Image: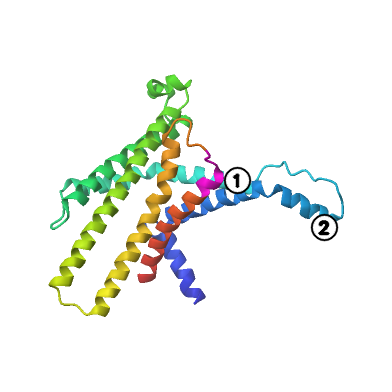
Amino acid sequence: MYSSLTTQRARLIASPGGLSAFLSTFNYTLYLLAYVESKSTPLKIRLYQLLNRTAAVPSLDGPSHIAALGSLLSSTRTTLRLFGLLPLYAWSRQLMQGPKPGQDQVLYATAVTQCLFYLTYQFLENVGVLTDNKVLPASYTSRWTARAGGKTARIFLWSYRAWLGGVLCDFVRLAREAQLERAKREKRAVGVVMTEEKAREEDRLADAKWWSQVVVPLGWAPMATQFSVEGGLPGWNLGVMGVCGFFAGLGRTSEFWAATADA
């Protein structure tokens, strides 16, 4: 059992996108823990006083090691995404060949739109990261950074807006897939011969897959909106971001985990 789980974890990390999904889930889990840690100061003070039998208040103003690790992991993921244009380019080349035989036109158009959004998002994020790290000369992006005092905030703002567009495309895709699935079940009910048990199992698997996928945009949408709006959303904090990112990453990780189990 242990050997099987170890092998599955190795497959998850080695699979395309598996490492990214795992790091994302871990990263936002750290953000959530850092937020909980920041809110637990009164409890930690009380425990210290009880354990040491003193009324003295300890100093707990030091930096959070959990938050520091979360920030480091976030920077690592951003650096890894510098190569994200390569698979997006491959996806765009595939889409340029036109819809596959029998592919729904709405799903194809949604995929093309989402690919364009994600290409824009990744390109602008790369420009921002490379400019901040002095890889690109500041003169290349001065047109975008002049209004922000030489900072790349505006580049990242439009990058996140493109990301939001891509996330919203997932809702369109999932809504269309649900519509097609309903039509398929209605057609099966009147004409296709299938045992009740097999039909119920097929429906259960389809529903489970759909719900596991809808969790992803539901998690990313608030975060993408937060970063797409100048000044951000009211009430946004590290805890909310941790919860949103955790569930979005968990949805993707569970998909990759299931795929490695079948491998």
Q: Is mark 1 on a helix, strand or loop?
A: helix
Q: Residue at x 65, y 47 (%)?
A: 39
Residue indicated by mark 2: 51
Which residues make up the magenta segment? 235-242
Q: What residue type is labelled 2?
A: Leu
Q: From the viewer's perspective, is 53 left or right of 98? A: right
Q: Residue at x 52, y 40 (%)?
A: 236
Residue 59, horizontal then vertical, whole percent? 77, 43
User: Is residue 238 within the magenta segment?
Assistant: yes
Residue 73, horizontal then vertical, whole percent? 53, 47
Depth check: give the residue in front, 241 or 253.
241
Depth check: give the residue in front, 124 or 154.
154
Depth check, mark 2 against mark 1: the one in front is 2
Residue 257, by quadrant, is bottom left
Q: Quadrant of the C terminus?
A: bottom left
Residue indicated by mark 1: 67
